[in-house]
Amino acid sequence: MKNDIESVLLSEERLAEIVQSLGKQVSEDYRGKNLLMVSVLKGSVVFMADLMRAITIPCSIDFMSVTSYGTGTKTSGVVKITKDLDIDLAGYDVLVVEDILDSGLTLSYILELLQSRSPNSVRLCTLFDKPSRHVADVKPDYVGAVVPDKFIVGYGLDYAEKYRNLPFVGILKPGIYAN
Ligand code: IMP
Ligand code: MG
């Protein structure tokens, strides 16, 4: 698996630092609020699991799943909900937890949908941001790290459902997805 990685972008140690710092910020900002962390499956599951343990205030969690990518590396712009939330958002301060903000098409759809369910607030925490690729007008409230316009895998991020279990984030060798 590691042979398919061109270079390591963020080590396990660096990721832990980033997550701790995000957790501290979120804990301060949401003190006295009714925090509900919404993880967008599957890419954000590793980040979610670490971030929630870096949060020191009470919080609830829920999961939703959408598809926009298939198995390729470019977004299709078509978003389909494959698993909706279990929790009614009324009274919650929703924090959407995402792995990476790329074109933003997936997230702009999700944020609008959640907003329409009348929670107290909706904000976005993305582990990675690729600002050079934004198409939709989505502004994240929390960003772990800005990354270059390269296809990255690991720490939850996949290529064709593989590499999610790498503990670090690496740049995939272009040869892997070119063939
Ligand atoms: P968007 O709608 O283009 O912002 O797509 C966001 C989704 O595409 C993310 O939640 C990821 O699942 C996937 N994605 C975008 N860039 C990458 C990448 O570099 N590696 C792995 N998945 C990616
Ligand atoms: Mg994905």
Image: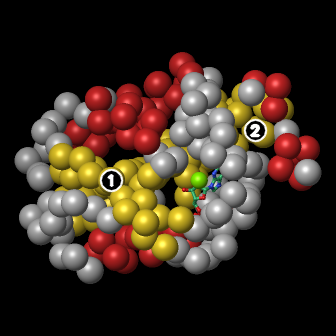
> Badge 1 is on which residue?
63
Residue 98 x %, y %: 45, 52
Amino acid type shown at disc 1: Phe
Q: Describe the element under mark 1 as helix, strand or loop.
A: strand
Amino acid type shown at disc 2: Ile
Identified at 55% across, 58% down, the residue is: 101
* Quadrant including the N terminus: top right
Q: Which mark is residue 73?
A: none
CB contact under 8 Å: marks 2 and 1: no
> Badge 2 is on which residue?
171
In the image, 13: left or right of 154?
left
Most extreme residue toward the bottom is 116
In the image, 144: left or right of 169?
left
What whole-number distance in Å separates the C-alpha atoms at marks 2 and 1? 27 Å
Identify whether 56 is placed above or below 108: above
Identified at 22% across, 60% down, the residue is: 86
Q: Quadrant of residue 170?
A: top right
In the image, 108: left or right of 26?
right
Identified at 66% across, 67% down, the residue is: 75
Residue 133 x %, y %: 68, 64
Q: In the depicted view, which residue is nearer to us: 72 or 51?
A: 72
Mark 1, other Cα within 10 Å: few <14 / some 14–19 / many ≥20? many
Identified at 48% across, 49% down, the residue is: 42
Mark 2, other Cα within 10 Å: few <14 / some 14–19 / many ≥20? some
- Pick whichever of labels 2 and 1 is earlier in the sequence: 1
Q: In the depicted view, which residue is nearer to us: 102 or 5?
A: 5
